[in-house]
Structure formats: C-alpha cells, structure tokens
Image: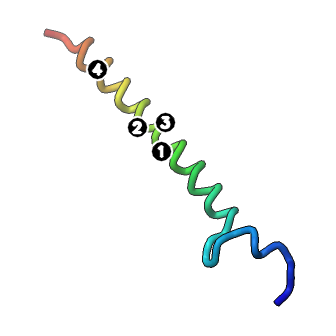
C-alpha cells in the first residue's frame, strides 16, 4: 500500500467528480428558479 493521498477520499469516490456534481446541482437549481420566475412573469402579465 502506498501513501499517495488516496486515503483522503472514501473508497469508490473521486473528489473531483463530487465537486463536479455539486456544481451541476447548483446550476440545475439556479436554472429551475429562472424557469419558475419566467413562468410567474408570463402568468401575471398574460392578456385577460
């Protein structure tokens, strides 16, 4: 067994992939809010 920094991450998990997942989740949630605000704007400004 070599001590090359592999002990810092749990077995089967790559810290880079986990960070990328958090970025993806952040962008996804941000996008959902943008879509929601556009839908609210469209509903409140729809012609009667």
Residue 23, position in %: x, y?
60, 48
19 in relation to 7, above or below: above
Please tell me whether mark 3 sits on a helix, a strand or a loop. helix
Residue 34, position in %: x, y?
43, 30
Mark 4 or 1: in front is 1
Circles 4 and 1, Cβ within 8 Å, touching? The answer is no
Quadrant, the N terminus? bottom right
What is the distance, in whole Å, between disc 4 and disc 1 at their CAs?
A: 21 Å
Residue 7, position in %: x, y?
75, 74
- Which numbered disc covers residue 42? 4
Circles 2 and 1, Cβ within 8 Å, touching? The answer is yes
3 in relation to 26, above or below: below
- Which numbered disc covers residue 8? none
- Which numbered disc covers residue 28? 1
Badge 4 density bin: few <14, some 14–19, many ≥20, Cα 10 Å:
few
Residue situated furthest bottom in the rendering: 1
What is the distance, in whole Å, between disc 4 and disc 3 at their CAs?
A: 19 Å
Residue 25, position in %: x, y?
51, 48
Quadrant, the C terminus? top left
Q: Who's the residue at 53% across and 42% down the image?
A: 27
Q: Which of the 4 image quarters holds residue 37?
A: top left
Q: Nearer the viewer, residue 48 or 22?
A: 22
What is the distance, in whole Å, between disc 3 and disc 2 at their CAs?
A: 5 Å
In the rendered image, which residue does mark 2 sit on?
Answer: 32
Circles 3 and 1, Cβ within 8 Å, touching? The answer is yes
Please tell me whether mark 4 sits on a helix, a strand or a loop. helix
Mark 4 or 3: in front is 3
In the rendered image, which residue does mark 3 sit on?
Answer: 30
Residue 21 left/right relative to 28: right
2 in relation to 9, above or below: below
Q: Which of the 4 image quarters holds residue 2?
A: bottom right
């Amino acid at each position: 067994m070599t001590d090359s920094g592999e002990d810092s991450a749990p077995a089967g998990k790559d810290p880079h992939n986990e960070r990328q997942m958090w970025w993806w989740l952040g962008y996804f949630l941000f996008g959902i809010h943008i879509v929601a605000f556009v839908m609210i704007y469209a509903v409140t400004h729809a012609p009667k």
